[in-house]
Image (cartoon, helix red, strand yellow):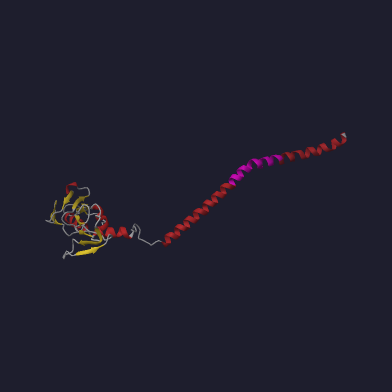
Amino acid sequence: MGLHQAQVEPGHQRVQPQLDLLLAARHSLIVDGVGLVSLFRFLGIFKAAVVGAWFICGAGVAMAADAPSTPAGDYVLSPQVASRVSALSSYKLAAGDVISIRVLGEDDFTREKIRLTDAGTVSFPAIGEIKVLGRTVGDLEAIIVAGLKGRILVNPRVSVQIEEYRPFYVNGMVEKPGGYPFQPGLTVRKAASLAGGFKERASLSKIFVIREDDPNQRAQKVDLNTPLGPGDIMTVEESFF
């Protein structure tokens, strides 16, 4: 028995270090396994993020390809906004409008809230009397720039702003007939609202407008969505049924 133990113990001594090494390696794998799992999870999330970003970028490129091309710095306006901008740029000044004229950095040339009269002119420093009736805001800015540039200022930057539009008029079957300041985007429906609304016996099928710029001053039949301009006269007739 002792001999047998003597014969086994040397082998046991040779195997034991290897077993200890394997146990240590197993323990190391168990401990590091958490890190490996975390690493694999991170790599999975990172891969998903990369794929998602690639998909979004691809979609963005496709949308950009389908979008209408515009020169750098240009903006595409909706048809409604573009129409309103066009209407304001072609708006012709007349008696009753209130405007302000400003020259950047030059307070001596600033004129605030000038109400235009039937005389049709505005007195401006260093230029004199300027005819404004029937002109657009852009026309007036160009006239002032031309009058100041060179002999007065090197590069004048002029801004003309409409502070208050001349009135339009509502008559007939509304609660509060009278004149009201024009507003961009005004329609027959909005005009009636400003005038307190339609009366009970108002005929919505018998609304007429006389345009300010119509030389014949002829009444035109309109509907609730018809645009109105400054100086226009709207009349709502009574319904007998």
Furthest-top residue in view?
A: 2
Image point (52%, 54%), residue name: 51
Q: Nearer the viewer, residue 17 or 39?
A: 39
Q: Is residue 30 magenta?
A: yes
Q: In which quarter of the image is the C terminus?
A: bottom left
Q: Nearer the viewer, residue 2 or 60?
A: 60
121 relative position to 42: left or right:
left
Image point (21%, 64%), residue name: 220
Image point (55%, 49%), residue name: 45
Q: Quadrant of the N terminus?
A: top right
Q: Which of 74 and 118 is in front in this view?
A: 118
59 relative position to 24: left or right:
left
Q: How many marks?
A: 0
Q: Give the residues in magenta.
A: 23-39
- Note whether residue 187 is visible: no
Image point (54%, 52%), residue name: 48
Position in image of residue 62 (x %, y %): 45, 60
- Note whether residue 49 is visible: yes
72 relative position to 227: left or right:
right
Main SS type for the magenta part?
A: helix
Position in image of residue 212 (x %, y %): 18, 61
Position in image of residue 47 (x %, y %): 55, 51
* In this view, 203 is above or below 48: below
Position in image of residue 237 (x %, y %): 21, 60
Q: Is residue 38 magenta?
A: yes
The quadrant holding residue 168 is bottom left
The quadrant holding residue 64 is bottom left
Furthest-front residue in view?
A: 241
